[in-house]
Amino acid sequence: MTAVEVTRAIVEHARAAGFHRVGVAPVDAPTRYRAYRTWLAAGRAGAMAYLSAPHQLEARRDVRSLAAGARAVIVVALAYAKRGGDDGAGDGAARGFVARYARGADYHTVLFRKLTELADALAAQLGRAVAARPCVDSAPVLERDFAEAAGLGFVAKNTMLIAPGLGSYIVLGELLVDVDAAPTPALAASAPRCGDCRACLDACPTGAFVDAYVLDARRCISYLTIEHRGVIDRALRPAMGAMVFGCDVCQQVCPFNAAAPDRNEPAPELAPIAGDRGAPDLIRLLGMGANQLRKLVDGTAMRRANRNQLLRNACVALGNLGDGAAIPALAGALSDRSALVRGHAAWALGRFAAPAARAAVDAALAAETDPYVRSELIAAASERGR
């Protein structure tokens, strides 16, 4: 088979596997490696020190360090649902927000399986073994560079990939193969881009965008609720709203997402799981035991956040929602085994002027010995619902 015929076969098999977009990029496609190093040097990766590990840097510079014989990079996109998974929203309960991509099955598992099936189909087509390395976003690959080079879309000002006709509610995957395949063309230079639009930059609640195309993870709600394992900056907490896992604000305001037709059916594997996973009852969440929490996140991308992070996030969300019904649950969280949870519960109670909130903070302050939690309790006592 010629390289062009191989690419046609790849596209055919990828579409049969249910991918919404597919393309082929050269192995040397990344163009933003230098910008990536600059971003790291500026400290904008926050606590994600693993991004600076030597093997991570080398793989992002040249994917052949992940698969020595790689000759082409197959790039795929899978759309997830823009709606659903928020049963119970509007019922008056204090509910949080979970990013849409995390409301169904874990996309890492789904993509890896589909990419493996694609590699097997390609090998059968070629009649030989194919050395292939499936990659999802946990792999050190500058995947948006490859996606752009393969013609799947363009990188927007919010740093996400927009696939025309689908928008940015997509997840990406790559398959490194030792096969000669003809690259698919990138989008024409005349294709619509962001232009003068600043909707995503201006809508970010925490001001995480330093400029167009530059995100400071340390201020990003997705980073704060998922990757960041420690204390959330007090100055950022009020802007986080009811987010408990991820954030979709910069996608919600994007005109390309508004224009994407609803006829594009999302991948069934990524369909929201029935129930209120997208809008969890925060008071109930704060009272969940270990087994209940495991059941909540099992099989989803929410596994990325541990128990203390989820409860920390729930405390911040409840403090921002200001529902007095949450005071008993937050008061109970002042006795949690985790200092991280106790500290954020104290902050949340400090947002309430109710006597019950003040009494809970005062009682905890009399017994608390952890220096960090005491600092939160003292701050909460001085705020008194302001």
Image (tube, rainbow, N blue to C red):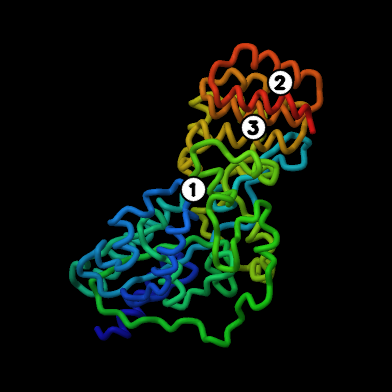
- Labelled disc at residue 105: 1
- Labelled disc at residue 328: 2
* Residue contact between numbered discs 1 and 3, judged by CB atoms under 8 Å: no
Three-letter amino acid code of the residue under disc 2 = Pro
Between marks 1 and 2, how big is the CA–CA gap?
33 Å
Q: Position of residue 187 (x, y in %)?
A: 50, 82
User: Which of the 4 image quadrants contains residue 345?
Assistant: top right
Between marks 1 and 3, how big is the CA–CA gap?
25 Å
**Label 2 SS:** helix
**Label 1 SS:** loop
Q: Say which label, 1 or 2, has the lower sequence index.
A: 1
Which part of the image, by quadrant, shows the N terminus? bottom left
Which part of the image, by quadrant, shows the C terminus? top right
The residue closer to the viewer here, 109 or 328, is: 328
Q: Residue furthest left?
A: 128
- Residue underneath mark 3: 315
Observer-side mark, 1 or 2, equals 2
**Label 3 SS:** helix
Mark 1 burial class by Cα count in 10 Å: few <14, some 14-19, many 20+ = many
Is 290 displayed left or right of 142 in the figure? right
Three-letter amino acid code of the residue under disc 3 = Cys
Q: Position of residue 312 (x, y in %)?
A: 58, 33
Q: Position of residue 132 (x, y in %)?
A: 26, 64
Q: Say which label, 3 or 2, has the lower sequence index.
A: 3
User: Which of the 4 image quadrants contains residue 129?
Assistant: bottom left
Mark 3 burial class by Cα count in 10 Å: few <14, some 14-19, many 20+ = many
x 27%, y 69%: residue: 177
